[in-house]
Amino acid sequence: MRLFVVGREGQVARSLREAAMKENDLVLQSVGRPEVDLLQTGAVAAAIARFRPDVVVNAAAYTAVDRAEDEPGVAFAINRDGAREVAAAAASEDVPIIHFSTDYVFDGKKPSPYEEYDAPNPQSVYGCSKLEGERAVMSANVRHIILRTSWVYAPFGSNFVRTIWRRLVEGQRLRIVNDQMGCPTYAPDLADAALALARRLIRTGWQSDYAGLTHVVGSEAVTWYDFALLIAKRYTAETAGSAEIIPVSSSEYAARALRPANSRLSTKRLQSVFDIRLPSLQTSLEDCIDRILKEQGGPS
């Protein structure tokens, strides 16, 4: 299987490269700036044509949620226009695309988990740009699978788990939002799901029920405060250190961009159509922290 991944330094792209190293029959090429820049018209199309992939995965995105409020042009150029270019390039080579999107396409007001057919209503520039990216991918390549995910974390990069762990090590007093709920999603689990989808596409050939939106998130929903408590529990077990974590409201946190209060996404379609289920939150979080500790050379 030949897999072309757009994006190189993000959590999902890095996880895809790691996963590919364990599979002997998989050839993966991952591209990013400056060699291949989504803002440079034609660059990604030329790279895809040279590689001749079986499946294209677009893991590149502008993800600076708050900064996007001041840089809408850049956010839309990458998340909408860049996504369209990747999808069109894949279509020109007659191959399907797997594209990643986000829970931010919803306003968070629904009291239960969001289904793929629920009407989007983004409340931020980032969310609007990602929604437009979904639509651009759909229009550019009929063979598309759009994976909406949320609250992504990994042993590397910038994410909630690494930030909370660092602040615990530094002995900081933490104030964590407790009125936003979502499903933390481990980037290596996302990579495994994407590879499983790619293999299915090659094994079965394209089928019409594959196309469209599919939610892929961790199996359990928590608030950011609950998530921080789980991280702190492992921290105290490893170090015997203490952790002071105080729940606060979103209004007290005062982020630049609005976040959905409810980011829970239903994964019924992921399970029924693709027979994919992600591991438990406890399993994935333990693996993530094990890797952080290994990188640090043990408990701090």
Image: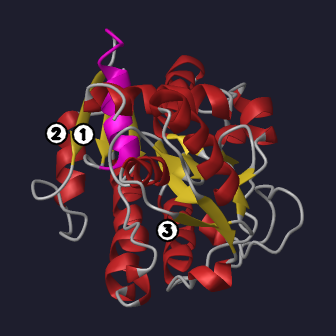
Q: Which of marks 3 and 2 is nearer the N terminus?
A: 2
Dots 3, 2 in contact, CB < 8 A? no
Residue 106 lies, in percent from the top left, at: 70, 71
- Disc 1 is placed on an element classified as strand
Mark number, residue 50: 2
The residue that appears at 24% across and 54% down in the rendered structure is: 45
What residue would you read off at disc 1?
Answer: 30
Q: Which of marks 1 and 3 is nearer the N terminus?
A: 1
Q: Total number of numbered labels?
A: 3
- Disc 2 is placed on an element classified as helix
Dots 1, 3 in contact, CB < 8 A? no
- For the residue marked with disc 1, what is the amino acid? Ser
**Can you name the residue that lies furthest to the top here?**
24
What residue would you read off at disc 3?
Answer: 133
Of residues 208 and 115, the one nearer the viewer is 115
- For the residue marked with disc 3, what is the amino acid? Gly
Instruction: Name the main secondary structure of what is drawn in magenta.
Output: helix
The boundaries of the magenta stretch are 10-24
Dots 2, 1 in contact, CB < 8 A? no
- For the residue marked with disc 2, what is the amino acid? Arg
Label 2, label 1: how far apart the Cα atoms are: 13 Å
Q: Is residue 119 above or below residue 57?
A: below
Q: In which quarter of the image is the N terminus?
A: top left
Q: Is residue 110 above or below residue 148?
A: below
Tell me: 266 left or right of 300.
right
Q: Residues within 10 Å of mark 3 (few under 14, many from 20)?
A: many
Which of discs 3 and 2 lies nearer the camera? The answer is 3
